[in-house]
Every structure is written in C-alpha cells, then in structure tokens.
Image (cartoon, rainbow, N blue to C red):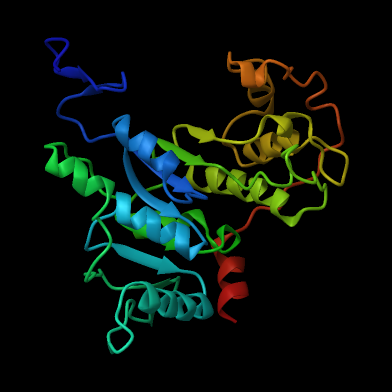
C-alpha cells in the first residue's frame, strides 16, 4: 500500500520501505529451522544467507525458505562428506548414483556448485506463499559450518556484498548453558559461541544487529568472573562497531513484557577487569584450516 507521494509503502508487519528500493538485507547465524529468518522475511527483509551446523535443521530451513538453485558452502572436507551422505539418505533413493554436492575447493572455502535439487528446497512455506500470490525472496546462500571456522571476509565474498552493506545480522546463540531450565554450567563450551557471534558482527559491520537469548543471560558470568554481556560489548567496542558506553546504555531498555519483568539493568557494567579480545584475521584462519 502506497502511503505517500514519495513512493513509500507499509508492509503487513508495519515496516515502512521505499517502493523502488531493494529490500533491507539480513544474514542469520545459528539459523536452526528458520524461525528468525521467517520473521524477518515477513517483515520485508531479504535474508541473503544463513549459517547452521546441524544438517536436519538446515534441511528444514531449505525446504521452507530456500529455492533451487542455491549456493551451499561448508568448512571442512569431513563436513562436506558427511553432508553428502546425509543428503543421499534423505533425498535420493538408495540405488541412485547421484551426489547431492560436488566437492571442489578454492583458496578460501569449500563450496558446492549452484545446485539443482531433485526435490525438497522451496517446496514448503515459500511455495505455499507463491501459490497464494505472495512472493518472498528465497535464501540463496547456505553455510553449513562451525561459526568458529567462518570469517566475515568469506561470507561477504560469497554473498557478493561489502563490509557495512548488510542492514542487519540476526542470530540466537545456544542458550542451554545460560537457561534456568538447564544445568547453568558456567563451563559449558556452548556459552562461548555468543562471543563468536559478536566477532561476526564486528567483521561484517552491519548497520544493526539482533540477538535472541534467554533472560537469565543478563546475570550470567564467565569463568573469569566478568558478565557475559559485558565481554560481548567489549568485543563490539574493540572491533570498532560501537562504543562500550553505548552498549551499556542499551542495557537500560528492557522489553516491556511479563517474561522480562524481573530483569534489571546491570549497574556495574564496565567496572570489572576486561579481557583483551583477540580478533581473528583471514590470514591465521587460512593457516589453521588449510595446513
């Protein structure tokens, strides 16, 4: 619906966009089955890529939000082989000689060709919307990889964008180690993945980012005794994404809902001894992965 003479329109989700401009873009980390991406797509965004390490979740994502042909990337030869075997069992008949992905390699990353699938991708939600007369851009770039093996340079090269081009980076790092529904193990290795998410924000330099986490993370500390969110904010600061003081200020704005009613802003954010964050570079990444 056009709402003014300059050509701006309002989406069903309430997002105001210029009629002739490209949709705002987003990249989804820890994408799972695609819930976060789906919400952004419905709000008017184009999700240009996603990262997920679990094969089953990635397959569900592709069924609903991707469309053939698409680009698929993986971080190790072993993961590519396991992915191929997984797809043969899930998609192809037992007697077929076809392969789901073609192994190839260049100087940066393992990748597939532009794939034409015999079935599945694009046969779910996105197809149902087209049948109903609604078009949503499919997610074309699928990174099946451990986020610790990814760099912003690799992602940007593969999706054909530059640092700062993305309108938003979205993601929900694993919450099992923080949730009061679990053991709340301070040494749970999954807890550190939130810092990898911060690293990717720094390396991609999106115009904004969104992170989904359990409420209890606000009061959770690292084994070093610092608040998890404090270290998250320091990574953003040291990576020249945003000042630490701005991140602390943002803690004052808590969503108004019953779920968050007991959460209070951290009063001593920034007063603890902070660890120096070691940034990854494309050089040491390549040396580690391709030796």
Q: Quadrant of the C terminus?
A: bottom right
Q: Position of residue 205 (x, y in %)?
A: 49, 41
Residue 20: name its quadrant.
top left
> Measured from the top left, where is residue 127 in percent x and y?
20, 48
Q: Is residue 160 left or right of residue 143?
A: left
Of residue 184 and residue 241, the one placed in the foreground of this image is: 184
Q: Nearer the viewer, residue 237 or 125?
A: 125
Residue 154 appears in the rendering: no
Q: Nearer the viewer, residue 266 or 290?
A: 266
Residue at 55 percent across and 78 percent down: it is 290
- Residue at the extreme front of the image, as rendered: 94
Residue located 31% across and 50% down the image? 64
Q: Quadrant of residue 222?
A: top right
Tell me the quadrant of the picture where the N terminus can be found. Answer: top left
Q: Is residue 212 left or right of residue 188?
A: left
Question: Where 18 falls versus 127 (above or below)?
Answer: above
| Rendering coords of residue 36 (x, y %) | 44, 39
**Residue in the picture at 67% in, 41% down:** 235
* Residue 136 visible in the current orientation: yes
Q: Is residue 88 above or below residue 264?
A: below
Left or right of 55, for residue 43:
left
């Amino acid at each position: 619906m056009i709402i003014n003479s300059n050509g701006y329109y309002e989406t069903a989700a309430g997002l105001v966009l210029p009629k002739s401009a490209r949709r705002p873009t987003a990249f989804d980390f820890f994408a799972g089955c695609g819930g976060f991406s789906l919400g952004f797509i419905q709000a008017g965004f184009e999700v240009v890529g996603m990262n997920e390490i679990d094969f089953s979740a990635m397959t569900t994502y592709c069924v609903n939000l991707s469309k053939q042909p698409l680009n698929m990337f993986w971080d190790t030869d072993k993961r590519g082989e396991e992915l191929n075997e997984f797809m043969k069992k899930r998609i192809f008949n037992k007697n077929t000689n076809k392969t789901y992905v073609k192994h190839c390699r260049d100087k940066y990353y393992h990748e597939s060709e532009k794939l034409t699938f015999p079935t599945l991708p694009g046969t779910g939600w996105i197809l149902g919307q087209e049948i109903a007369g609604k078009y949503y851009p499919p997610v074309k770039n699928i990174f099946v990889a451990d986020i610790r093996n990814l760099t912003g340079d690799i992602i940007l090269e593969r999706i054909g964008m530059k640092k700062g081009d993305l309108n938003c980076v979205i993601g929900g790092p694993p919450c099992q180690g923080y949730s009061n529904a679990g053991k709340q193990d301070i040494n749970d290795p999954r807890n550190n993945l939130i810092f990898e998410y911060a690293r990717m924000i720094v390396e991609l330099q999106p115009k904004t980012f969104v992170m989904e986490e359990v409420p209890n993370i606000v009061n959770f500390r690292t084994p070093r005794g610092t608040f998890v969110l404090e270290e998250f904010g320091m990574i953003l600061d040291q990576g020249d994404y945003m000042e630490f003081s701005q991140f602390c200020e943002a803690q004052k704005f808590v969503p108004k809902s019953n779920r968050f009613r007991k959460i209070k802003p951290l009063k001593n954010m920034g007063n603890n001894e902070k660890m120096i964050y070691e940034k990854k570079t494309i050089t040491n990444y390549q040396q580690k992965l391709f030796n």
